Amino acid sequence: MDYNLSSAGEKKTNCAEQSKCFQLLESILDGENIPEADRILKEKLEKCEPCYRHFHLEMAIKELLKTKCCHQITPQDLLENIRKKVQEIK
Amino acid sequence: MSEVQRKKYSDKEKNQIFDREFMPHIDSMYNFAYRLTFDEDDAKDLVQDTYLKAYRFINSFEQGTNAKAWLFRILKNSFINDYRKKSKQPAKVDYQDVETYYNSDDVDYTSTTDLRVDAVKDMLGDEISNALNSLAVDFRTVIILCDLEGFTYEEMAKILDIPIGTVRSRLHRARNLLKEKLRSYAQTMGYNTDEEE
């Protein structure tokens, strides 16, 4: 599979297949089972500036979502109502 | 043969499954319901309805399988089939339209790639929460399932009844839309997002 890597050893400033590459990077970031994920990630981050920036930006946003958007307090009466209604079904 | 006869749980077993496998997910369920409905009472109704359905259909649940994904699927279906129908809210943008619109590979990356990591890291909870809430429900949902709840793409595909490829592409588009929103916030915070390297 062609991962569009530069052979020059320098970081590319343009990524020819951004949509494809970025989706692949996101899959790796999401912990999906991607064959040779470590090698692909290392090569892309070392050789492609847009991929490097995309990966780190997505990682920061993912972290922010996880830490800031998961703390809705469950109302106490919801728990009590569920238990009461379940008893009624039985 | 490999076909397993669906077993009927005893009342004691039902209660154990309910308490040990279903109830521990109530905070995640409420957070999901609240982010779908934006209303505390509606979220409570949706979660309660989901748990009652889960109890009624508990024999369809196979012990040892993913209870959280099973519950999320019921909640998502309840939201679509019950809540959205009776809601007096004007119809939101249908995801089919949105998906078709964003289905091309012509996503404009130039406007999102200039959002900086340091700008994101300086954001307080409100910006990211508001940005997430502003997304169309189907885009919001994939981000909640993946980034907040940590479901795999395969689990998300089952919860949403869509192919894994669609999960991947919808998530990618949702993230681009989220970055557009965050970029607007970054600009109001004084970050120069238009700066070229």
Image: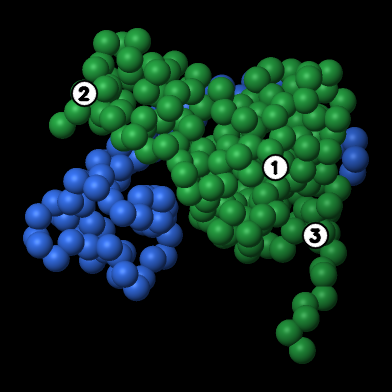
Query: Could you say which is closer to the camera, residue A24 or residue B62?
Result: A24
Query: Could you say which is closer to the camera, residue B26 or residue B164?
Result: B164
Q: Residues within 10 Å of mark 3 (few under 14, many from 20)?
A: few
Q: Nearer the viewer, mark 1 or mark 3?
A: 1
- Which residue was labeled with disc 1? B96
Residue B79 in percent (x, y) is at 76, 35
Residue A23 in percent (x, y) is at 42, 52
Q: In the rendered structure, the residue with mark 1 lies on which chain?
A: B
Looking at marks 3 and 2 on the same chain, the residue that comes earlier in the sequence is marked by 3
- Which residue was labeled with disc 3? B60
Q: Residues within 10 Å of mark 1 (few under 14, many from 20)?
A: few
User: Which chain comes out blue in the rendered image?
Assistant: A
Between the C-alphas of marks 2 and 1, the distance is 35 Å
Reply above or below: B12 against B126. below
- Which residue was labeled with disc 2? B195
Q: In the rendered structure, the residue with mark 2 lies on which chain?
A: B
Looking at marks 2 and 1 on the same chain, the residue that comes earlier in the sequence is marked by 1
User: Which chain comes out green in the rendered image?
Assistant: B
